[in-house]
Image: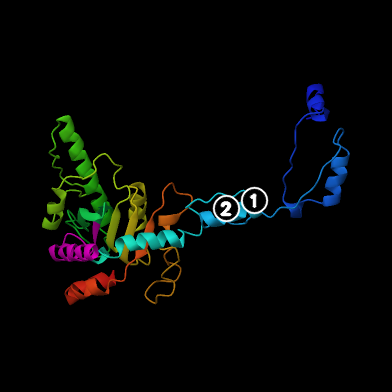
Amino acid sequence: MNGDAIGKQIHTGKSAWIYIMLGEAQSIDREELCAGLEGVEGLDEFFLARIAVPATPPTSQIIAAMWSSQYWPTVYRKNNPLGPHPSMISRATLEIKDDAALWMSVAYRVAQRAHETGIGEPMAAVIVQRGEGKARIMAVAADARWVGETNRSPTSTGNPMAHCALRAISMVAQKLVRHERRAAGDCIETPVLDFEPFQDQPILEEERIIFQEEHPNPDGYLCHGLELYLTHEPCVQCGMGILHSRMGKVIFAHRQSLTGGFCSETRGHDMPDIPEGSAGHGLGLFWRRELNWSLLAWEWEPTQELALLPPSIRMSILRL
């Protein structure tokens, strides 16, 4: 401010300016600061105050308002590092608790069909749209990682782009494409390729029935606000696909100790059959503050659904 004559005049003149200096209290020597301020020409009076600033973001709007009145202006954002607020989880749980078992049962049955037909592992996904007191299935997809795998080896992991979560999301996208092409008068037939990596066309009859139905909200953004029911925790790849599709809720049954991306704690280090140092990282992708989307996720307790399946299928699911 004292670098030139004009700045010095503004600084020392009778103006309505108030100058505020902010700093971390433990890094500032009070006596040294006072001595420095007293030596500033034209600074007739000053005062020092020690203000408490919350170390973590508030976990609700109520806490934000309380902290703002008592300490420091604070804003509540839902993507706080502590995860979704309990009240938000409670409201969302009430929305899904009455029929979640129904959608999960569908997922288990489709997973069984994937195993029986050999197209993939006993895994499946069901996407549900909820609104106006009703819910309907938007997409059903089994795991199809073994489709087109003619030289399958014991160490092969199959086609990662044909995981059930990605297939289900892509089927919703195909419905939107179909609607847009029909509205524009374009051909809606999809080309037949020698190998389709995403496998987003129906393979099982259960998939085909739902795929033939039209998208109820073709003007929306892909899977915005929809619910995804999975027999298994999505891997990191599928987890990011779920985030980018703007899914609203994810409910999965079985944790994937090495490859799962949704659980927030590190897993597998205490399992005897997993080598030391190869435990899965707790990425918690559903609620990462550095990502541009977050959603709610639950781990399902699948006692009833598993009991409905044949013993061989049930053990295959539990081993994954």
Identified at 37% across, 67% down, the residue is 257
Mark 1 lies on a secondary structure that is: loop
Q: Is residue 122 magenta?
A: yes
Question: Where is the N terminus found, in terms of image quarters?
Answer: top right
Tag in front: 1 or 2: 2
Q: Is residue 45 left or right of residue 162?
A: right
For mark 1, what is the residue? 72
Identified at 76% across, 50% down, the residue is 49
Residue 105 visible in the current orientation: yes
Q: Classify 3 as above or below 82.
A: above
Q: Main secondary structure of the magenta part?
A: helix
- C-alpha gap between disc 1 and disc 2: 10 Å
For mark 2, what is the residue? 65
Question: What's drawn in magenta, residue-wise?
Answer: 102-126
* Residue 80 percent location from the top left of the image: 50, 54
Tally of marks? 2
Identified at 37% across, 56% down, the residue is 236
Q: Is residue 19 magenta?
A: no
Q: Disc 2 residue type?
A: Ala
